[in-house]
Image (spheres, helix red, strand yellow):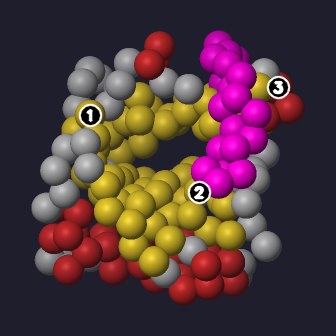
Amino acid sequence: MAIFAPFAQLSAQAANDPRFTAAFAYVHALLAPGSEGRARIGAIEVGSSKKIDLAGGAFAIEQVYNTKQRPDGFFESHRNYIDVQVIVEGEELMEVEDIARLTVTQPFIEDRDFIKYAHTDLASVLKVRAGDATIFFPEDGHMPSLQWKGPGVVRKTVVKVPVA
């Protein structure tokens, strides 16, 4: 099931899993005040994103967006990649539910590694702030990017870590 914590704690909990080595090194550098990565994500315009290739088949998608109202969100999951989502600036709500409890509305799309699910009112809600991170595994249906205290801008990276 999903892991949620401030990034320092989350990376310590999963430090022995070699799948996350490149992802955690990248995020540590990104979160460092004054770093090149921090400047890079700070320069991304709202509504845009940038892909960063990492070692071991992992890659990051640095993105900046306006949070959305819940009716505009959707649950998703992935088969081939684990999501490590880290808020750099801003705050949002994320919902998470076991995919066995969700109803598929869009079957698996191989080239996007994406499955879409119907809304549910039974999901757990995470309040995610700058410096917080989540790990969503293939069995974790997740709905990120939701408004918390109203509309806001979020700067976030999503690191895609190969499952195998």
121 vs 13: above or below: above
Answer whether residue 26 is magenta in the image.
no
Q: Which contiguous range is marked in magenta? A: 105-123
The x, y position of residue 11, in whole percent, is 55, 71
Per the rendering, the mark at residue 83 is 2
38 vs 124: above or below: below
Amino acid carrying label 2: it is: Asp
Answer whether residue 113 is magenta in the image.
yes
Per the rendering, the mark at residue 66 is 1
Q: Residue at x 25, y 75 (%)?
A: 37
The x, y position of residue 141, in whole percent, is 69, 37
The x, y position of residue 126, in whole percent, is 52, 35
- Determine crowd level at label 2: few under 14, some 14-19, many 20+ residues with C-alpha closer than 10 A: many
Tell me if I can see residue 15 in this picture: no
Specify which label sits upstream in the sequence, 2 or 3: 2
Amino acid carrying label 1: it is: Asn
Q: Residue at x 55, y 60 (%)?
A: 84
- Determine crowd level at label 3: few under 14, some 14-19, many 20+ residues with C-alpha closer than 10 A: few
The Cα atoms of the two marked residues, 2 and 3, are separated by 20 Å
Q: Which residue is drawn at 44% across and 19% down?
A: 72
- Pointer 2 with pointer 3, Cβ within 8 A: no
19 vs 152: above or below: below
39 vs 133: above or below: below
| Secondary structure of the residue carrying numbered label 1 | strand
**In the picture provided, is 111 more to the left or to the right than 92?**
right
The Cα atoms of the two marked residues, 2 and 1, are separated by 20 Å
